[in-house]
Amino acid sequence: MLNNPSRAQPAAVSMHAPRRRLGGAAALAAAFSLFSLVVVWHELHGPSAHAADEPIAQAHADDADQTPDDVATLTAPGVNGANGANGANGELIRRGEYLARAADCAACHTADKARPFAGGLPISTPFGTIVTPNITPDPDTGIGRWSDADFLRAMHEGIGKSGERLYPAFPYTAYTRVTEQDVLAIRAYLNTLTPIHYTPPANSLKFPFNQRWLMVFWNLFNFTEGRFVPDPKQSAEWNRGAYLVEGLAHCEECHTPRNFMQGLQSGARFSGAVQAGWHAFNITPDKLSGVGEWSDDELIAYLSTGAAPGRANAAGPMGEVVANSTQHLTPVDLRSIVVYLRSLPPVSGGDTRGRHQWGTPADDVTALRGTAITGVNGAQLFVANCASCHSWTGQGVGASAPGAYPSLIHNSTVGATDANNLALVILHGVNRATAHADVMMPAFGGHLDDEQIAAITNYVTRQFGNPQATMSAGQVAKLRTLQ
Ligand code: HEC
Ligand code: HEC
Ligand code: HEC
């Protein structure tokens, strides 16, 4: 997944389970029947008002806005100095770059590192594929001809330059909360990028999902336009955290489960969801199902390095979030995010033990070596493929040093109630580069078959994690197809 340019990204229209397709069809039927009603409503009321753009809301969000001290060193390669990197404009551009990282625009709009922000990343959904557009300042193939108003409208309302509805695979549902000032700073930064003349391949969505106007209905049920409104009863830190988590950093796009229309379930925020096979875990403060037992420092370490020894490591989409986005956030912003996460209502998934509380070291090497082996043997495969780094006891090598080979005991991926992430980690490996360490676990998808991967997965959960989490060869085969 990490090396594959066609990895799936959070797509609000993505439907990972076939049973959800029925939900999609039902939504569509409902949508069609509501069509005439809504047309009439729109005739009467005109385009939706720009709610909550009150200067006071903006002032509050900006008050808590931290400009990183070391921001001068953040200037990315590919920034052409044409607009000047000094003075007020330079400051605006650097702020925009910081915010673009917090929003992780590059995750979806960079398919090829040689073409930063030029789009072309296919986002697969059961309706077909949406390909991200070029957002470099190229006038013909990018957004060079867009006015600031066009850009604001896209980010806040999900409407493209020609008035077309954008698909919520673009998380405008979260970006709508970002202040106008911050959106314009991002725009100023994007203006300094090297224009790349590149037209990404067209979307290949099936009828009727290629009908953009249908998004009118989706928005009606699943989208509330409007800027972040600070809560005066909360601290500046909490408000900054809420602004980042709900807006720019769009954490809910992966961590909040979706309703049958693929809109976010407002009653179960941050309680975990599965996207393209990956389980983005419950991150509410629930002690058993969420991250309630993590310390503040552990959460900060996880977001800034991808590793919280004894709790979790960040692989797959979260590894990318850490590498592209959260590792670049200032300590003040990271702490604000944690303050906000701590304040969420805990949501229990019914777990009887925390994900990180499972497992004991293997203590019988002869059992692992398996004297008389018949067929595919998980223990033997583990010793042959994994023990060189994670040790045959499962305790890893290097403890909590940067770049250590982590212990598989007390690891959330191994202790989760489903073995999806574990099988995906074995299939695709881990590849996460941060200022802290470059971590690399090889991908085994190429040389182990589905049955072997299922056997290792089952051995690892039984021995080092949650024995209820099992995996069949058929499930591995399915996970392989989810890219
Ligand atoms: C989770 C993936 C994702 C992230 C993150 C993301 N985008 Fe996009 N973006 C998309 C997709 C997909 C589309 C195309 C939607 C469509 O075709 O309707 C899009 C469309 C756009 C458009 C409209 C371009 C056009 O030609 O119509 C703009 C502008 C844009 N994004 C800017 C941004 C900026 C700025 C950021 C960061 C603040 C960002 N995007 C982050 C996926 C993403
Ligand atoms: C692109 C999807 C995506 C986005 C966006 C995302 N996450 Fe995650 N997150 C995941 C996945 C998938 C995992 C599980 C990773 C693993 O098993 O290695 C995860 C794991 C985590 C964990 C560890 C939980 C545990 O018990 O192991 C924390 C904490 C977390 N995310 C916080 C956040 C925060 C805060 C944000 C917003 C700043 C965020 N995530 C945004 C997908 C995402
Ligand atoms: C060459 C060394 C190496 C080998 C061989 C190796 N790993 Fe890893 N493994 C790593 C590294 C490095 C990480 C990432 C550490 C981090 O995230 O900081 C990792 C992470 C993991 C994680 C945690 C992922 C998460 O999201 O929390 C699991 C589980 C895992 N490996 C299982 C295995 C299994 C099973 C095998 C054998 C099929 C294996 N590893 C083989 C080096 C290795």
Image: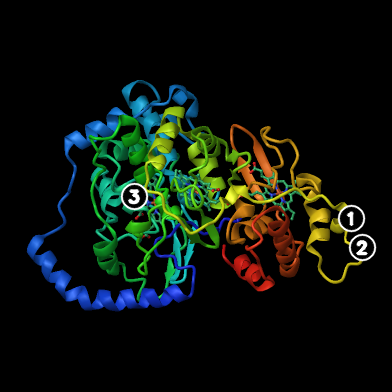
The residue closer to the viewer here, 145 or 18, is 18
Secondary-structure class at tag 3 = helix
Within 10 angstroms of label 3, few (less than 14), some, or many (20 or more) residues? many
> In front of the other: label 3 or label 1?
1
The residue closer to the viewer here, 342 or 173, is 342
- Circle 3 residue: 174
| Circle 1: residue type | Thr
Whichever of labels 2 and 3 marks the residue nearer the N terminus, that label is: 3
- Circle 1 residue: 366
- Which residue is pictured at 59% across the width and 56% down the height? 416
Most distant residue in the front direction: 352
Gap between marks 1 and 2 measured at Cα: 7 Å
Percent position (x, y) of residue 118?
A: 46, 49
- Circle 2 residue: 371
- Which residue is pictured at 29% across the width and 61% down the height? 222
- Which residue is pictured at 23% across the width and 34% down the height? 232
| Residue 3 in view | no
Image quarter of the C terminus: bottom right
